[in-house]
Image (cartoon, rainbow, N blue to C red):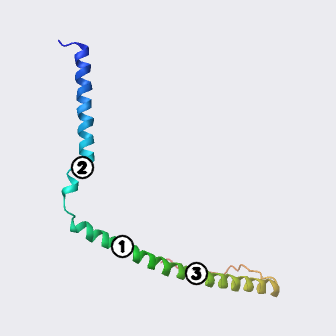
């Protein structure tokens, strides 16, 4: 059986090797020699087009909302004026409930 101190040194060395390997892989030392991928360039160009289109769409939507808000305000003013006119004309007529006999007579044979 090995000593506890030896196990601790082995564990410390394994952790050191693990983190050093992790740092080397994270640094990407091989990435500087790679050529630029044309797919990435096409993706960047597409992103720029989509950004431009989104700005144009946002402008259109903002204009439409402004028109809608104006029309809504005018419609609400019309409704308020109609309510005022109805209140000024007097109370609404009362409703009568009338019970009528049935329209059809069902006979059993």
For this orientation, the residue located farthest to the left is 1
Question: Cβ–Cβ below 8 Å for labels 2 and 1?
Answer: no
Q: Is residue 38 left or right of residue 91?
A: left
Observer-side mark, 1 or 3, equals 1
What secondary structure is marked by label 2? loop
Q: Earlier in the sequence, mark 3 or mark 2?
A: 2
Upstream in sequence: badge 2 or badge 1: 2
Q: Is residue 44 left or right of residue 86?
A: left
Q: Which residue is mark 3?
A: 66
Residue 84 vertical placement versus 21 (above, below):
below
Q: Using the image, determine if residue 85 lies above or below residue 33.
A: below
Residue highlighted by disc 1:
48
Q: Nearer the viewer, mark 2 or mark 1?
A: 2
Q: Which of the two labelled residues, at mark 1 and mark 3, occupies the earlier sequence position?
A: 1
Name the residue carrying label 2: 28
Which quadrant of the view contains residue 42? bottom left
Horizontal relation, residue 47 to residue 71: left or right: left
- Quarter containing the N terminus: top left
Bin the neighbour count of mark 2 within 10 Å (Cα to Cα): few under 14, some 14-19, many 20 and up: few
Q: Are marks 3 and 2 in contact (CB under 8 Å)?
A: no
Coordinates of residue 10 in the picture (x, y in percent): 22, 23
3 vs 2, front mark: 2
Q: Nearer the viewer, residue 4 or 66?
A: 4
Residue 41: x and y, percent? 26, 69
Mark 1 to mark 3: distance in Å?
27 Å
Along the viewing direction, whichever of 89 and 37 lies nearer the viewer: 37
Q: Label 3: few (<14), some or many (≥20) within 10 Å? A: few
Outermost residue on the front side: it is 33
How many numbered tags mark residues here?
A: 3
In space, the residues marked 3 and 2 are separated at their CA atoms by 51 Å
- Mark 1 burial class by Cα count in 10 Å: few <14, some 14-19, many 20+: few
């Amino acid at each position: 059986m090995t000593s506890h101190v030896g196990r601790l040194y082995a564990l410390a060395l394994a952790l050191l090797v693990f983190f050093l390997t992790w740092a080397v892989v994270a640094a990407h030392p091989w990435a500087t020699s790679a050529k630029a991928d044309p797919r990435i360039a096409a993706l960047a160009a597409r992103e720029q087009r989509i950004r431009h289109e989104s700005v144009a769409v946002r402008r259109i939507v903002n204009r439409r909302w402004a028109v809608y808000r104006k029309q809504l305000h005018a419609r609400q003013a019309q409704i308020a004026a109609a309510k005022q006119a109805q209140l000024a004309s007097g109370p609404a007529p009362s409703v009568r409930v009338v019970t009528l006999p049935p329209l059809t007579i069902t006979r059993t044979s």
